[in-house]
Image (cartoon, grey):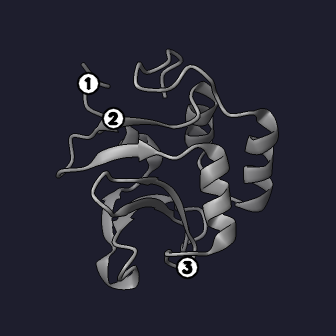
Amino acid sequence: MSPSKPSWLPPQGASEDVLKEMQSTVVGLPSSYLDLLRLGNGGEVGLFVNHYTLCLDSAEDALAYWKSGTYTIQEAFVFSGDGGGELLAFDMRQPGICSVVCFDPIDPEGSVEHIAPSFEQFIAMVDGQNA
């Protein structure tokens, strides 16, 4: 993640209290994801992959969703929607690996699609990020 703030992020970043709670509640979240939330707590931008849009959830919403256990696959941390009804999440089923997946909440286990092997590679797919 570059030190400059992407233009698609809102002006306010997530609070350190919420980020600390995320880290203690969900062990293994990528530091690059937490760093992005420090810059802007949510946001929406197109992606260079398929038809996806990154609709980044705020830290508070992502944490609440994790705690609810609703519409998810086991050991997946939902951090975004894709703008079309599917969810983007970290697949944390393998220790030390935190790939990005997309799935339909109607059939979570049967619809998992791997998007990127890491959050860093996923965020590089942001439209205009590399321009």
Q: Looking at the image, can residue 124 be seen?
A: no
User: Which residue matches tag 3?
Assistant: 74
> Furthest-top residue in view?
4
Q: In the image, which is nearer the foreground, mark 2 or mark 3? A: 2
Q: Is tag 2's residue or tag 3's residue first in the polypeptide sequence?
A: 2
The amino acid type of the residue labelled 2 equals: Val
Which of the 4 quarters of the picture holds residue 114?
Answer: bottom left
Along the horizontal axis of the image, is 44 left or right of 21?
Answer: left
Q: Is tag 3's residue or tag 1's residue first in the polypeptide sequence?
A: 3
The amino acid type of the residue labelled 3 equals: Gln
Along the horizontal axis of the image, is 123 left or right of 38?
Answer: left
Placement of the C terminus among the 4 image quadrants: top left
- Considering the numbered disc 3 on the image, is that residue within a helix, a strand or a loop? loop
* Residue 90 percent coordinates (x, y): 50, 60
User: In the image, what residue occupies the spot 59% across and 62% down?
Assistant: 96
The amino acid type of the residue labelled 1 equals: Gly
Residue contact at pointers 3 and 1, CB within 8 angstroms: no
Q: Is tag 2's residue or tag 1's residue first in the polypeptide sequence?
A: 2
Q: In the image, which is nearer the foreground, mark 2 or mark 1? A: 2
Mark 1: few/some/many CA within 10 Å (<14, 14-19, 20+): few
Residue contact at pointers 2 and 1, CB within 8 angstroms: yes
User: In the image, what residue occupies the spot 56% across and 19% down?
Assistant: 11
* Residue 31 percent coordinates (x, y): 62, 41
Q: Looking at the image, can residue 68 be seen?
A: yes
User: In the image, what residue occupies the spot 39% across and 83% down?
Assistant: 109
The answer for how far apart the CA atoms under marks 3 and 1 are is 33 Å
Rendered image: mark on residue 10: none
User: Which residue matches tag 2?
Assistant: 45
| Labels in figure, total | 3
User: Which residue matches tag 1?
Assistant: 128
